[in-house]
Image (spheres, rainbow, N blue to C red):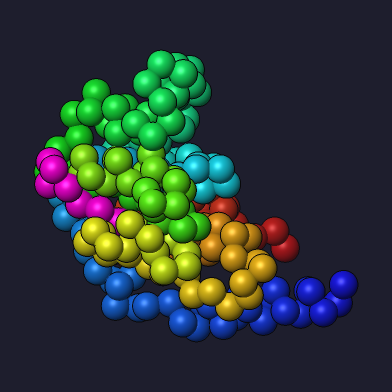
Amino acid sequence: MIDHIVQFLEATQEIAAQLNRRCLEHLIEILVEVRDDGGRVFFLGVGGSAANASHAVNDFRKIAEIECYAPSDNVSELTARTNDDGWDSCYANWLQVSRLNARDAVFVFSVGGGDVAGGVSVNIVRSLELATQVGARILGVVGRDGGYTAEVADACIIIPTILEDMTTPLVEAFQAVVWHLIVSHPKLKLNKTKWELTPALP
C-alpha cells in the first residue's frame, strides 16, 4: 500500500515536470483570441473526463468570462441523441445545432484522444471532424499518444505515461491541473474566486 502511494505521488511530480510549457502558453493564447473574437468554447469528455468538462465550463465562464458549454451537461438531449442517432454522432450533432463556427473552439479532455479504428471515443473524433470542417480551433488535454485529438489539434497537452497501470487516474487528474493552470493565468483570469477575496482567519 505504501509503495502505491509513493509511486503515484512520484509519478505526479514527474508528469508536472514534463508538461510542455510552450504548448501551454500557445493554448492560453488561443483561448484569449477566442474570447476576444466573441467565440465560444465547447468542452468534450467521456466518463470522468465529462465531469472535468462540466467543471471547466464553470471555471472558464466564471473566472475568465468565456462563453462555454459541455454537451454532456444536458443529459436529456445526450441520451435522446444516443438513443435515436447513436453514440458516435451524439456530440457532433449537438455541436451542429449549436452552430459551431470558426470563432469557436472545441476543447477535448480524453485519456486516449479518440480512435475510430479502435472504437474508442468515436463521438469525440466525429466532433473534431466537424470542427475541422467549420474552421473551429481544436484544443486538448489527453493521455497516451494523444490519439486523433493530438493529430488535428491547434494546441494539445499530452500527459506523459509514467505508470502504465495508472494511466487513467493520472491523466484525468492532470486534466484538472492543466485547466486550473490555464484559467488562473493572468492573460485569462478576469475575476477572483471567493477564497482569494476572503481574508484569512487569524
Q: Residue 84's x, y, as percent?
A: 41, 16
Q: Is residue 61 above or below residue 173?
A: above
Q: Is residue 136 magenta?
A: yes
Q: Residue at x 20, y 52 (%)?
A: 137
Q: Is residue 41 above or below residue 171?
A: above
Instruction: Determine if residue 181 is in view.
Output: no
Q: Residue at x 30, y 33 (%)?
A: 92
Quarter of the image for residue 3 reads bottom right
Q: Residue at x 62, y 72 (%)?
A: 164
Instruction: Determine if residue 157 is in view.
Output: yes
Q: Residue 44's x, y, as percent?
A: 40, 43
Answer with left or right where residue 107 lies relative to residue 9. left
Q: Residue 175's x, y, as percent?
A: 49, 59
Answer with left or right where residue 167 lies relative to residue 93. right
Choose between 115 and 166: the one closer to the eye: 115
Q: Residue furthest right?
A: 1
Quarter of the image for residue 27 reads bottom left
Answer with left or right where residue 139 lies relative to residue 120. left
Quarter of the image for residue 12 reads bottom right
**How many numbered marks appear?**
0
Q: Quadrant of the N terminus?
A: bottom right
Question: What range is drawn magenta here?
Answer: 132-139
Q: Quadrant of the C terminus?
A: bottom right
